[in-house]
Amino acid sequence: MTRLLFRDDPYLQQAEAQVIGHTAEGGIVLDASIFYATGGGQPGDSGLLRWPGGRLTIATAIKAEGDHIALVPAEPLALPPVGTVVMQHLDWTRRYRHMRVHTALHLLSVVIPLPVTGGQIGADRGRLDFDMPEPPEDIAALDAALNALIDRDLPVTESWITDAELAANPGLVKTLSVMPPVGQGRVRLIGIGQGGARIDLQPCGGTHVARTAEIGRVEIGRIEKKGRQNRRVSLTLAD
């Protein structure tokens, strides 16, 4: 399987790796990746590969067979041969904004404690769909509560539990549309706050900032009705 360098350090912006294969669609498979692969509502990362005598712009990263990640070139150019050592360069500006939006959406699920039916992450805005029969009466109050949590500069931490422990604690899963991956023996949890000050804990495979203050100010937009009980809540990074 591809070693997930972004999981070890989401702030890693460049790293060497070796090409171990190509997909039939023209993707590049590395033995280790700083590029997050599309999944869980978060887009795949973009950036650049360099190697002696070549360079290639990467448009996105996707999951491939065998627990690998395939990097998708932006143009149909010659691929680095298998065995080539390449230097990965992440489009850090875009990734970091994904990290900020993703962490903000975790906080949004705290200020709106309802089941989540869907979500999407972008570089400027994100959204969660909630099982919400009636719209909230005071959006400004939700906005203030969300930014107050951000301002507390809470640590964002990672921990792991077994599949069996997750099955015994179904309340950890907030999303109704996407279940956390099981079958590998353990599941990654993202917590916000620590000890008695922890405000959130849920399974997640995405990338996040280390502390909530890094998110910066966000603004909750209008709430859209999406079906009989579903309502879509969007937020935007203010800078």
Image (cartoon, helix red, strand yellow):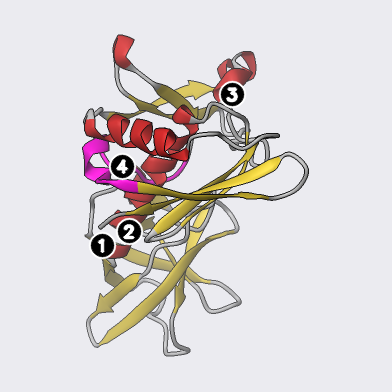
What residue do we see at 54% from left, 34% from top?
Answer: 137
Specify the label residue 107 is tagged with. none
Q: Nearer the viewer, mark 2 or mark 4?
A: 2
Q: Dot 4 lies on which element? A: helix
Q: Main secondary structure of the magenta part?
A: loop
Labels 2 and 4: the sequence-earlier one: 4
Tags 2 and 4 touching, CB below 8 Å: no
Is residue 179 positioned above or below 41 on the image? above
Q: Which residue is labeled 2 in the image?
A: 95
- Residue type pointed to by label 2: Arg
- Residue type pointed to by label 1: Trp
Quarter assignment of residue 30: bottom left
Tags 1 and 2 touching, CB below 8 Å: yes
State how far apart marks 1 and 2 are (Cα).
5 Å
Q: Which residue is labeled 1 in the image?
A: 92
State how far apart marks 1 and 3 are (Cα).
33 Å
Q: Is 215 positioned to the left or the right of 169 in the image?
A: left
Q: Nearer the viewer, residue 45 or 130?
A: 130
- Residue 93 visible from this viewpoint: yes
Residue 186 position, x and y percent, is 52, 28
Q: Nearer the viewer, mark 3 or mark 2?
A: 2
Of all residues, the one furthest to the top in this rendering is 196
What residue do we see at 59% from left, 19% from top?
Answer: 171
Q: Nearer the viewer, residue 235 or 155?
A: 235
Is residue 84 positioned above or below 128 on the image? below
Labels 3 and 4: the sequence-earlier one: 4
Q: Nearer the viewer, mark 4 or mark 1?
A: 1
Query: Magenta segment, which residues?
Result: 205-218
- Residue type pointed to by label 4: Asp
